[in-house]
Image (cartoon, rainbow, N blue to C red):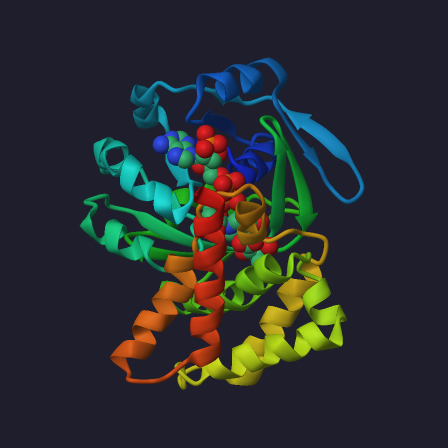
Amino acid sequence: MRIGILGAGSIGLLFASYLGKQFDVTLFPRRHEQMDLINEKGVTIETLDSTFTTRVRATLDKNEFNKQELIIIAVKQYHLENIQADITNIHNEIPLLFLQNGKSHLKLINHLEHESIIVGSIEHGALKINETTVVHNGIGLTKLAPYRGEINRISPLLNWHCEYFQFKTYLDYKEILLKKLLVNAIINPLTAILKVKNGELIKNTFFMQIFHDLYNEIIQLFPELDSKIVLNEIIRICRNTENNESSMLKDITLQRKTEIDAIVGYILELAKEKNVQLPLTNMVYGMIKGMEKRGIE
Ligand SMILES: NC(=O)C1=CN([C@@H]2O[C@H](COP(=O)(O)OP(=O)(O)OC[C@H]3O[C@@H](n4cnc5c(N)ncnc54)[C@H](OP(=O)(O)O)[C@@H]3O)[C@@H](O)[C@H]2O)C=CC1
Ligand SMILES: CC(C)(CO)C(=O)C(=O)O
């Protein structure tokens, strides 16, 4: 199966390293410099117990999209607008897989005319440390569900077994995205504000109290979910990715824009519609927006 990966950041490199062991992978980075380095050195991954390099191709040639049998979109939410035209030009019969945190990408996806669109929720922790190297800091699942069309179009991927890199399919994309939204609404801003790795949130009793308070405030918006089960899932992901720096902490450290609007902003919009006050969530949102502004100025 020929797989194209659009975006060669933490997640793009993570997917390329594992999938490149089994499939014919082409990475589509944004910059020439990164393309050359990937073509020269391959992609190296550091896992808990080993380091290995996978040879994959990298290109900036967008015509190559249409030679793929699956395109994985591994850019941030706020990059999607810039690549919307590229995605629209991909032939409609090529399946697309979107891996973004948050839920804002659903608006863009809805406008696409592709026959098969899959959305994913990643529970791995990954950190790009240079243009060709990623550290796999937390082993988790990638949950996939069809947004439109048949998920079986990517059955070679679904049937492939790799111990540290597993996929599981679900029927209801709304449920997996909503649960992941809650994971990111708690872990990402708190780790970015407190400047701690994910595991610290559940090891430090004071941080854990803040975690619970924020969670209890947000979960009231979603009476359809079992509060205890979701809480345990968030704690499980924190534990599995204990050594990871969340993608939001990474963005704040590098003074980049974060995905706060697609995650916490989305929840605040929903609260407004439901006429529910979320003071803690508002505060957390303001803190991240303020830190972002300070970084960008
Ligand atoms: N990292 C993690 O542990 C996890 C991340 N996620 C989610 O996965 C998604 C990707 O995150 P992550 O990999 O961490 O983000 P990164 O910021 O590490 O990577 C994003 C990449 O997209 C590239 N990019 C931006 N615009 C373009 C473009 N026009 N063409 C090609 N490439 C482009 C950037 O290139 P450049 O370097 O040139 O700017 C960058 O390499 C996010 O939605 C995130 O929330 C989900 C779970 C875990
Ligand atoms: C799974 C988790 C919390 C890993 O850090 C993540 O989604 C992120 O960092 O964005």
Residue at 25%, 50% (x, y): give it. 108
Residue 258 visible, this orientation: no
Where on the picture, by quarter, is residue 296? top left
In percent of width and height, residue 176 lies at 44, 65
In percent of width and height, residue 232 lies at 62, 76
Residue at the farthest right position: 49
Q: Is residue 295 above or below residue 18?
A: below
Q: Is residue 53 above or below residue 228?
A: above
Residue 286 visible, this orientation: yes
Pick whichever, 15 or 158, lies toward us. Answer: 15
Count of labels in the image: 0
In percent of width and height, residue 14 lies at 58, 39
Residue at 41%, 26% (x, y): give it. 30
Q: Give the side of residue 207 with respect to residue 77, left or right.
A: right
Residue at 68%, 75% (x, y): give it. 208
Q: Is residue 7 above or below residue 227?
A: above
Q: Quadrant of the C terminus?
A: top left
Q: Is residue 238 above or below residue 226?
A: above
In percent of width and height, residue 210 lies at 62, 76
Q: Quadrant of the N terminus?
A: top left
Q: Give the side of residue 71 with respect to residue 280, left or right.
A: left
Q: Splitting the image into four quadrants, where does ligand 2 fall? A: bottom right
Pick whichever, 114 or 260, lies toward us. Answer: 260
Residue at 44%, 63% (x, y): give it. 170
